């Protein structure tokens, strides 16, 4: 009888402790910022073939030509990539030079995606096995990087570009060119 009560009180204490731990974690502010390990480092060397016939491929040297750029990692099968397409068009209209890396995509799928959603890219490289994507510190699609004119990664935007992100990306691009 006493053993049963001790066991029961132990379970109550364990449950209360877990409840307190959960409540504490839920009360802490959410940190959505992920610090990239590639910020401030040069873009790794790469040379990707063209993803679509109407645009040249992309090489690391193209990102160190003295002009800052936005590097957008995307895929035709990526639903958030469709959602960000109008904001990529807004960035291009505001003067951003946007280059792209199509991840694990067939050329015809990328072409269809661009016909449907617009093509803000001056160059698009095809990364069939995500080797370049992983080497630059990208873990998913879409992701956008601000690259300065010397090929240094200055900023990483994880996820789709929303209306509220356009001004920030333009500011980061401007800072990268200064």
Image: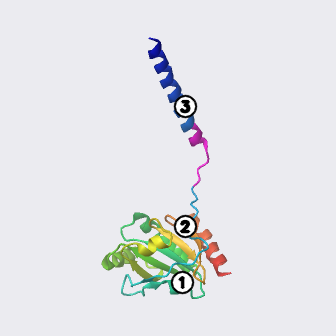
Q: How crowded is mark 3: few (under 14 residues within 10 Å), some or many (20 or more)?
A: few
Indicate which disc residue 157 carries: 2
The percent coordinates of residue 147 (x first, y second) are 57, 78
Earlier sequence position, callout 1 versus callout 3: 3
Disc 3 target residue: 17
Kindly identify the residue that appears in the image at 53 percent across and 74 percent down: 90
Question: Left or right: where does residue 143 sit relative to residue 77?
Answer: right
Indicate which disc residue 42 carries: none
Q: Dividing the image into 4 quarters, which one contains the N terminus?
A: top left
The kind of secondary structure element at disc 1 is: helix
Measured along the vertical axis of the image, is residue 88 above or below residue 10? below
Disc 1 target residue: 63
Kindly identify the residue that appears in the image at 39 percent across and 84 percent down: 50
Question: Left or right: where does residue 125 sit relative to residue 166?
Answer: left
The percent coordinates of residue 58 (x first, y second) are 45, 84
Of the pair 67 and 114, the residue shown nearer to us = 67
The kind of secondary structure element at disc 2 is: strand
The percent coordinates of residue 155 (x first, y second) are 59, 71
């Amino acid at each position: 009888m006493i053993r049963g009560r001790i066991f029961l009180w132990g379970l109550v204490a364990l449950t209360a402790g877990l409840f307190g731990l959960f409540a504490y974690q839920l009360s802490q502010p959410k940190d959505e910022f992920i610090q990239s390990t590639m910020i401030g480092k040069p873009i790794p060397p790469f040379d990707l073939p063209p993803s679509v016939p109407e645009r040249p491929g992309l090489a690391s040297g193209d990102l160190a030509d003295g002009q800052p750029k936005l590097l957008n990692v995307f895929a035709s099968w990526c639903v958030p990539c469709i959602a960000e397409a109008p904001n990529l068009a807004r960035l291009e209209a505001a003067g951003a030079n946007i280059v792209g890396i199509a991840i694990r995509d067939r050329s015809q799928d990328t072409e269809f995606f661009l016909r449907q959603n617009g093509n803000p890219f001056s160059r698009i490289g095809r990364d069939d096995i995500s080797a370049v994507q992983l080497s630059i510190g990208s873990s998913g699609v879409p992701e956008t990087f601000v690259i300065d004119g010397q090929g240094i990664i200055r900023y990483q935007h994880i996820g789709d570009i929303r209306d509220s992100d356009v001004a920030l990306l333009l500011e980061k691009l401007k800072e990268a060119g200064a």
